[in-house]
Amino acid sequence: MSSTTRGRIDKRQAILDGAFTVFARQGYAQAGVQDIALEAGVAKPTVYNHMTDKATLFRHAVEAAAMTALDQRVAALAPLGDPGDDLAATLEGVALALLRLHTDSRYCALRRLLYSEITHFPDILDIVKEYGLDRLNHALADRLARLALAGRLRTTDPDLAAEQFLALILGPLEARSQMGTRQLEEAELATIARTAVETFARAWVVS
C-alpha cells in the first residue's frame, strides 16, 4: 500500500472518529461539519472530499462505530476457544468482558445516537441488524457448538444456549443501569457475570 493510499485511509478514519464524537456530543441536528473537521484535525473541504454531505457522514460514522463494537465483542469470546479445565470460570471471564464493553462510554453513546436518530434515519436499522446482537449471538453460538462437540456442554441447540447466555448478562445489566443511564461499579458487573454463569452452568455445562 502506497503512503498516499495509507494517508487517505488514516484521514478517512480520523474523520469518522471525529464525526462520531461530535454527533454523540451534540446530536445530529446541532453537529456542524466545521465542528467535525476541527475534531478530526482536518480542513472542512477534506471532510466533503471523503463524504458528500452530513447525512452520509452520519451513516458512515455510526456504521464504523458499530463495526468496531462488534469486533471487540467477538474478540472477547476468544477464551472459549481454549477454556481450560474450569469452563465456568472462563465463561465468567467472557461475561465480565462483555459487560465491560457494553458499559463502555463509546458504546453507550452509540446506543443513544441510534435511539435518538432512528426516526430520522430509519435505514440505520440495517446497521443494527448487520453489526448488532444477532451477529454476536451467532459468533457465541459457534463457540458453544464447539464446546458441545467436545462434551463440555449438554446442548443440541447452541443458538438457544448463546441467546440465553447473553440474556442472562444483558438483562440484569439493562435493569441495574437503567438502560445505560446509570454507571455500574466493577464489583456490580462482576456480580452480574458470576450469577449469570451460575444459572447458565446449571442448565448447560457438563459437570
Image (cartoon, helix red, strand yellow):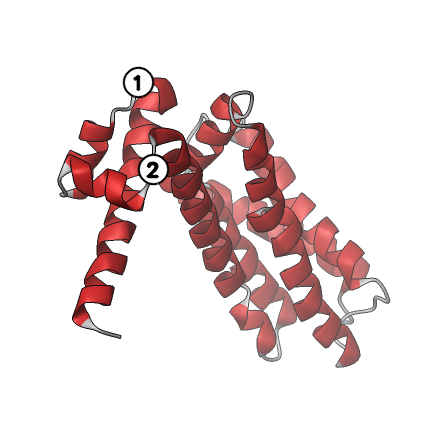
Dot label at residue 167: none
Residue drawn at the location 86% of the way across and 67% of the way down: 156
Q: Is residue 206 left or right of residue 97?
A: right
Above or below 13: residue 185: above
| Residue at numbered disc 2 | 52
Q: Within 10 angstroms of label 1, few (less than 14), some, or many (20 or more) residues? A: few
| Residue at numbered disc 1 | 30
Residue drawn at the location 47% of the way across and 46% of the way down: 66
Instruction: Name which residue type carries label 2.
Output: Thr
Q: Nearer the viewer, residue 103 or 110?
A: 110
The quarter of the image holding the N terminus is bottom left
Residue drawn at the location 58% of the way across and 46% of the way down: 132
Residue 84 place in picture, x, y as percent: 58, 79
Spatial separation of the CA atoms under disc 2 and disc 1: 18 Å
Question: For numbered disc 2, what is the local secondary structure?
Answer: loop
Q: How many marks?
A: 2
Q: Is residue 92 left or right of residue 186?
A: right
Regarding residue 184, the answer to whether it shows in the image is no
